[in-house]
Every structure is written in structure tokens, then in C-alpha cells.
């Protein structure tokens, strides 16, 4: 079924993976009664089926690095929200771009990591590099696949994540702008994603750092 042709559909969002941020964002998306979601993930057992709205959500099982699994699932989406992980993240990025191009989908929200552009200054930057190591190299390679595309993307680079029940964030625009702060709540990231979903022109082809104000330091206070 091509959900893009559904007469009552306002926007369709395509959510990749089942991480904590993705689940928080899912709840926010569903507050708009016009939104319908396709939830794409490798392990459906990670979802609590009792929380799924069968009228507005569809689960598709697949691997985001495999075009023959991703392309049919993504068909008809208006927005792709990608919250992916893994050592093959670059391959996943390539496949997402190709699948979106094949179906003519333009809007992409891509979750990356702080530090992929060596944009985190001072002692916190050094600490971040030491902790994340090669993770930064693979996530940078994935981000490069996105920025080299003709997609209408927003790359989000969150600070170290907390589970605080708060929406409190500021952004740094551009990959070369020095990153601020050391932490941000997952709910803040989800809220920012939802703001882009509500206004698709927001930070179009933007590369955005996300942090909680006044959390500067040599490392996150809780670490």
C-alpha cells in the first residue's frame, strides 16, 4: 500500500530503529492525529506491542544496510527519521540515501554524534575523543554520505545523553562551530526532532549540535 496516496493522510513519518530517543520521538509524533508512522527495525521484540497504535503505526522488520529490505519499506514516506547505530553505519547511510532517491523522498532527519567533525573544544573534546575512539570515524563517514547527497537533511549531533525528564537545549549551527555544553536529555533531542517534523523547513540542510545550556565542563557532570 502506498500510504502517500491515503486520502486522510497529512504527513507520513518513517522511523528507523527502536532506540530510546526514537521511542520518545514516536510519542511526540503521535500527538498529531494526522501523523502515521512506519517503524522499521531489525528486532521487533524491542517494541512493546501494547503501545503500538495499529490504526496509525505499521511495523516493518528489516536491515537498513540492505536496499532490497529498506526500499520497499520506505516507499511512500514523506519524512525519514533515522536513529541508526552499528559498525556498518556508513553502509546504512548509503542505503538510506539510495532508497530515498529511488522513491523521490527528500526530507531526512539523521542522528549522528558530537565530535565527528573534531568540533568539540578543550579538555572535553579530548575526553570525548578518548572515550568514543573509532566510533567517531565511522559516524563521520556516515555523515559525509548524507551531506554529499541532494537530500533535504538535518544532521543532529547531540551531547552526551541523559534520561532527565526535561526539554532544555540550545543549538550550534554548522560542523565547524565549536560545540557547547557536555550533556543533553534524550527528551530534548526528541523534542527538537518533532519541531523539524512540524516545520520541515527548519534547519534544512543543516548540521546542528545540540546541548543543554550551562553544562560546560571537562566531561559530563554525571560521568
Image (tube, grey):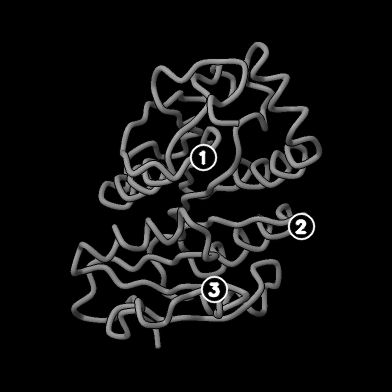
In the rendered image, residue 13, in percent from the top left (x then y), is placed at: 37, 65
Give the number of the disc on residue 46. Answer: 3
Characterize the local packing of mark 3: few (<14), some (14-19) or many (20 or more) Cα atoms within 10 angstroms: few
Q: Which mark is residue 161?
A: 1
Residue 183 position, x and y percent, is 50, 30
Give how far apart the Cα atoms at labels 2 and 3 are.
20 Å
Tell me what residue is drawn at x 45 percent, y 23 percent: 172
**How many numbered marks are there?**
3
List the single residue furthest toward the bottom: 1
Task: Label 1, secondary structure: give it.
Answer: strand
Q: Nearer the viewer, mark 2 or mark 3?
A: 3
Q: Nearer the viewer, mark 1 or mark 2?
A: 1
Q: Sequence-wise, which precedes: disc 3 or disc 1? A: 3
**Dividing the picture into quarters, in which one does residue 212 lie?**
top left
Q: Is disc 2 surrounded by few (<14), some (14 to 19) or many (20+) residues within 10 Å?
A: some
Residue to which mark 2 is pinned: 88
For the C terminus, the quadrant is top right
Residue at point 46%, 20% (across, down): 215
Q: Tag 3, which secondary structure?
A: helix
**Horizontal arrangement in the rendering, residue 97 relative to residue 186 (left or right):** right
Relative to 61, does residue 157 appear above or below in the rendering? Answer: above
Q: Looking at the picture, how far across and down is residue 120, in whole percent?
A: 62, 20
The CA distance from mark 1 to mark 2 is: 22 Å
Instruction: Please tell me whether residue 91 is drawn above or below residue 185 in the rendered image.
Output: below
Instruction: Identify the mark at residue 21; answer none if there is no mark.
Output: none
Inter-mark Cα distance, 3 to 1? 20 Å
> Of 80 and 83, which appears nearest the observer?
83
Q: Considering only order in the chain, which callout, 2 or 1, is on the residue closer to the N terminus?
A: 2
Numbered disc 2: secondary structure: loop
Quarter holding residue 168: top left
Where residue 146 sits in the image (x, y, percent)?
61, 46
Is 35 displayed left or right of 142 in the figure?
left
Amino acid at each position: 500500500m502506498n500510504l502517500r496516496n491515503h486520502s486522510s493522510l497529512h504527513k507520513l513519518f518513517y522511523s528507523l530503529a527502536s532506540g530510546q530517543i526514537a521511542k520518545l520521538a514516536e510519542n511526540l509524533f503521535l500527538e498529531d492525529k494526522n501523523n502515521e508512522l512506519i517503524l522499521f527495525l531489525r528486532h521487533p521484540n524491542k517494541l512493546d506491542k501494547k503501545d503500538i497504535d495499529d490504526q496509525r503505526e505499521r511495523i516493518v522488520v528489516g536491515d537498513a544496510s540492505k536496499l532490497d529490505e529498506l526500499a520497499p519499506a520506505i516507499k511512500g514516506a514523506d519524512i525519514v527519521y533515522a536513529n541508526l547505530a552499528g559498525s556498518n553505519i556508513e553502509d546504512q547511510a548509503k542505503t538510506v540515501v539510495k532508497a530515498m532517491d529511488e522513491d523521490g523522498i527528500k526530507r531526512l532527519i539523521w542522528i549522528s554524534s558530537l565530535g565527528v567533525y573534531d568540533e568539540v573544544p578543550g579538555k572535553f573534546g579530548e575526553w570525548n575523543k578518548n572515550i568514543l575512539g573509532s566510533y567517531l570515524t565511522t559516524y563521520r563517514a556516515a555523515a559525509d554520505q548524507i551531506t554529499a547527497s541532494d537530500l533535504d537533511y538535518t544532521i543532529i549531533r547531540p551531547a552526551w545523553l541523559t534520561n532527565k525528564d526535561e526539554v532544555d537545549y540550545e543549538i550550534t549551527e554548522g560542523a565547524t562551530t565549536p560545540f557547547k555544553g557536555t550533556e543533553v536529555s534524550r527528551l530534548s533531542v526528541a523534542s527538537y526532532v518533532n519541531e523539524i517534523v512540524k516545520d520541515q523547513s527548519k534547519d534544512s540542510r543543516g548540521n546542528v549540535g545540540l546541548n543543554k545550556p550551562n553544562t560546560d565542563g571537562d566531561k559530563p557532570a554525571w560521568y
